[in-house]
Image: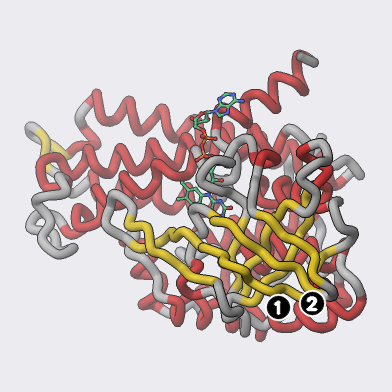
Amino acid sequence: MDLEFSKEELAFRDEVRSFAQQKLPAEIREKVDQGRPLTKEDQVRWQKLLADKGWIAPNWPLQWGGTGWTPTQMYLFDDELGAAGAPPVIPFGLKMVGPVIYTFGSEEQKQRFLPDIVSSNVWWCQGYSEPGSGSDLASLSTRAVRDGDHYVVNGIKAWTTLAQHADWIFCLVRTDPNAKKQQGISFLLIDMKSPGVTVHPVITMEGDHEVNETHFEDVRVPVANRIGEENQGWTYAKYLLTHERTSIANVGAIKRTFARVKREAAKVTSGDGTLLDSPVFARKLADVAIQITALEYTMLRILSQVARGGAPGAESSLLKVRGTEIQQSITELLMEAGGYYSMPFVAEHGKAIGPEFTARAAANYFNYRKVTIYGGSSEVQKNIMSKAVLGL
Ligand SMILES: Cc1cc2nc3c(=O)[nH]c(=O)nc-3n(C[C@H](O)[C@H](O)[C@H](O)COP(=O)(O)OP(=O)(O)OC[C@H]3O[C@@H](n4cnc5c(N)ncnc54)[C@H](O)[C@@H]3O)c2cc1C
């Protein structure tokens, strides 16, 4: 196992670093730094800058706009952009449905959908979960009934992130209610402008509009919008979930927000010095710093295996669990550094009355409760790991 970067890899890292320094708009970096939500325009603006450089879809096949990078280059790319304060790309098109379309879609579907995803012209959202089906996703009940060359779709998709901006949604629907539950599911691409689709906002506890419920009432969807074979959707869905989990850890962004906690804590007085001199706070910081280093080396070890021809399996669950737990610890440390001023009722209309960083400290603390739930909850990831390790 070789954990050192080669000369070429270090040169590549420098190229990414200077790209981010030159191209990442300052106002977007500032919002990311302060944990403020980005608008659709911010997100599309940054994604188009990446697309112009040819770096928007590194893991895609070259033919469809990929880069042909090694796994190590992809890691360095994510690490540098995270460290520069760049927002992660919205994953639904680029990291989820895109790979499903180029792997399992028809030639016509590839031509129709992939170019618009790569150029960020079309916004996608994910319609997997339902009010009664989250961890046990295969129990989903949204129905699609065949009617000539269309399906008629009825049901509710829960937690549809950013569906209020979406042009298209990819959905798991039940096409055979009599088959074993994993075997009666199909994968449909649905135009959000179709009659019968409605989006209902769900306001999360920090007060933001990030998620929705999306309802389908007699929505007619062309059979041509089905990916692959009827009733084989579960196979495509599982493929997508592994992609989703590996990208959640986000070590570069973790390192940047951790550095911010240290910077802000250094400005907070505590006794004769600052918070950094407080043994209790310093011990907590050291604990998280050690966990970040361990996560980074675990990531590099996995990459080193992948570079030698292996494929990540249950390891993606390990990265998801540790990465998200660390992200939550960092939001807790920032709350703690702000003390009283971090209390949600102290900030008025998003404006801090204490140190500036406290304006969104509570909001981000609450928002980050989601990371150990979405993409498969920590408990479910631990089941996957225990099966892999213990064979239970
Ligand atoms: C902010 C946010 C955004 C989301 N965005 C999307 C999206 O865009 N599209 C989408 O399709 N979905 C989305 N989700 C849904 C997400 O994938 C589900 O919330 C998740 O899979 C858990 O399902 P659930 O909420 O139904 O909880 P449940 O499955 O009901 O789980 C409840 C609790 O029981 C535990 N549990 C369940 N089964 C087991 C088991 N077998 N062993 C041990 N413990 C278990 C869980 O860990 C959890 O603690 C989002 C969720 C959140 C919170």
50 w.r.t. 210: above or below: below
Q: Identify the amino acid type marked 1.
A: Val
Q: Residue at (51%, 82%) from the top-left corner?
A: 45
361 w.r.t. 22: above or below: above
Quadrant in the picture for the C terminus = top right
Left or right of 335? Residue 87 is right
Left or right of 78? Residue 339 is left
Front in this rendered view, residue 157 or 343: 157
Image depth: mark 1 or mark 2 in front: 1
Q: Position of residue 150 (x, y in %)?
A: 78, 73
66 w.r.t. 361: above or below: below
Image marks 1 and 2: residues in contact by CB distance under 8 Å: yes
How much space separates mark 1 and mark 2, taking CA atoms?
7 Å
Q: Which residue is mark 1?
A: 118
- On residue 341, the disc is none
Q: Quadrant of residue 318?
A: top right
Q: Position of residue 371 (x, y in %)?
A: 48, 44
Front in this rendered view, residue 360 or 274: 360
Front in this rendered view, residue 106 or 132: 132
Q: Which residue is mark 2?
A: 65
Q: Position of residue 221 (x, y in %)?
A: 72, 73
First-in-chain label (1 vs 2)? 2
Q: Residue at (69%, 60%) from the top-left corner?
A: 96
Local crowd size for mark 2, using a 10 Å CA cut-off: few (<14), some (14–19), many (≥20): some
Element assignment for label 2? loop
